[in-house]
Amino acid sequence: MRKILVVGAGQSGLQLALGLQTKGYEVTLMSNRTADEIRTGRVMSTQCMFDTALRHERDLQINFWEQQAPKIEGVGVSVAGPDGGRAVDWLGRLGGFAQSVDQRVKMAGWLDVFAQRGGQLVIHGASVSDLDFFARTYDLVLVAAGKGELVSMFERNAARSVFDAPQRALAVSYVHGLGPRPEHPDTEAVRCNLVPGVGELFVMPTLTTSGRADILFWEGVPGGPVDAFAGVKDPSEHLALTLELMERFTPWEYARATKVELTDAHATLAGRYAPVVRNPVGRLPGGGLVLGVADVVVANDPITGQGSNSASKCAASYLSSILMHGDKPFDEAWMKATFDKYWFTSGKPVTQWTNAMLGVPPEHVLNLIGAAGQLPPVANRFANGFDNPADFDAYFYDPQDAADYLAEVTASSAGDAPSGDPSGAASGASSAE
Ligand SMILES: Cc1cc2nc3c(=O)[nH]c(=O)nc-3n(C[C@H](O)[C@H](O)[C@H](O)COP(=O)(O)OP(=O)(O)OC[C@H]3O[C@@H](n4cnc5c(N)ncnc54)[C@H](O)[C@@H]3O)c2cc1C
């Protein structure tokens, strides 16, 4: 039986460990926290996952919270106008639902299941010297330790890393008591509120330790008015500041947030990190090799909500590469090929789209986002790009591609009934929502 060590019990590490375990590998999982420490600790993410990523969990039958978690049917985009109202406001419909399950719930639950199924769980914060020792006793060492210190083993790939500093300051609050958006009261959706020059407010439903909740997530342009959470230590001050900024920049979201309260004592998170792509193979002092997984090798800003999706896709891709490799040695060539398969299918399109969304949008992107208010197919396609970011390549980056696409949709919509939108699939920029 082949022996594999997985370091890090997050989305990618646990998904891989559980998948390998099911396939009969002898898996050791090293986590720097116990399940209870994770469950009662601080929130870590907003972790909204779309259809493809959720399907990978379903394939392994580890989608334990699917029935309880809110089913997210749409992605809405609102752009703040100069008058404090909304210059753009629409909702795109997802082909398959998305879900956010608090990582405290999911990772703690998966850790317990891994141990119950006989997996060897080691609670220990692994160091490079630990890995140096273990690399000799395992057939393969996978480092899935997120953005922790072990990333120092993996060289930054300068050609693939566009930024060398954080592009947003992040501030998350999990709350109970948020009202629905009045224009679509029965539709669960991720709401992306873009405030030009200031940042973005994302609002989405989640399943947390105390049941259904909503997340308020500010992404602030560094040095701007939303980049204000660094010194805030008290959770209630963090929430008060979140709401104050909502009232100032996104009053339509504030209107439904006047009665919210934090879900628990650890329901807030603030921080920032620089997006980075690293080389996938780490070389240990003793000469052993380790393979980096998910955020260790490709860490994007959460502005596009892709990291957990990518972690799931990376874990699924690596699992299939490991299975296909049979009994052959997991050498450097295999490690590079395994990463390349993930990078070219998922990592690269996500990185390209995320980096584009961090910049000032060019005119053709503004046109696309604006036109989606009148053209439901454009809104729907944009929303489904969160599931399959490779699709943006066909119409989003190049001004001519965008113009061609809009002309095509406009022509095919010309024959459709112009008034109303019985499906509620999109509402126009001028709608009085
Ligand atoms: C504010 C915010 C919002 C986000 N929102 C979304 C979203 O809506 N959708 C989405 O898809 N993604 C989102 N992400 C990104 C997503 O959370 C991450 O990309 C994803 O969790 C990465 O998974 P991973 O398995 O690579 O690493 P992680 O989930 O970070 O897991 C790594 C694990 O390894 C452990 N560890 C670290 N060092 C060691 C060590 N030395 N030894 C042992 N264990 C170690 C850590 O404690 C952790 O448990 C968001 C991120 C942030 C910060």
Image: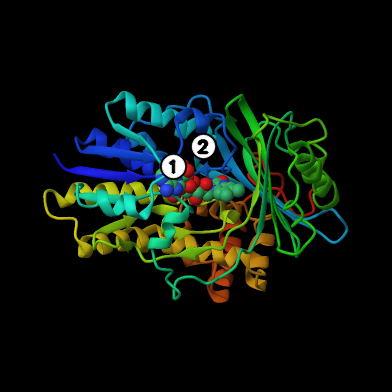
Marks 2 and 1 close (CB-CB < 8 Å): yes
Q: Earlier in the sequence, mark 2 or mark 1?
A: 1
Between 141 and 429, the one lying in front of the other is 141
Is residue 233 toward the left or the right of residue 48 in the image?
right
* Mark 1 Cβ and ligand 1 under 8 Å apart: yes
Residue 89 percent coordinates (x, y) = 73, 51
Q: Is residue 313 above or below residue 123?
A: below
- At a point 38% along the width and 37% down the height, the residue shown is 57
- Where is the N terminus found, in terms of image quarters? top left
Give neighbour class at mark 2: few <14, some 14-19, many 20+ (Cα, 10 Å): many
Residue 6 percent coordinates (x, y) = 32, 44
Q: Is residue 432 visible?
A: no
Q: Is residue 12 above or below residue 166?
A: above
- At a point 38% along the width and 63% down the height, the residue shown is 154
* Mark 2 Cβ and ligand 1 under 8 Å apart: yes
Q: Which three-letter amino acid code belongs to the residue tagged 2?
A: Gln
Residue 10 is marked as: 1
Q: CA distance from mark 2 to mark 1?
A: 8 Å
Residue 296 percent coordinates (x, y) = 42, 56
Question: In the rendered image, which residue does mark 2 sit on?
Answer: 103
Q: Is residue 209 visible?
A: yes
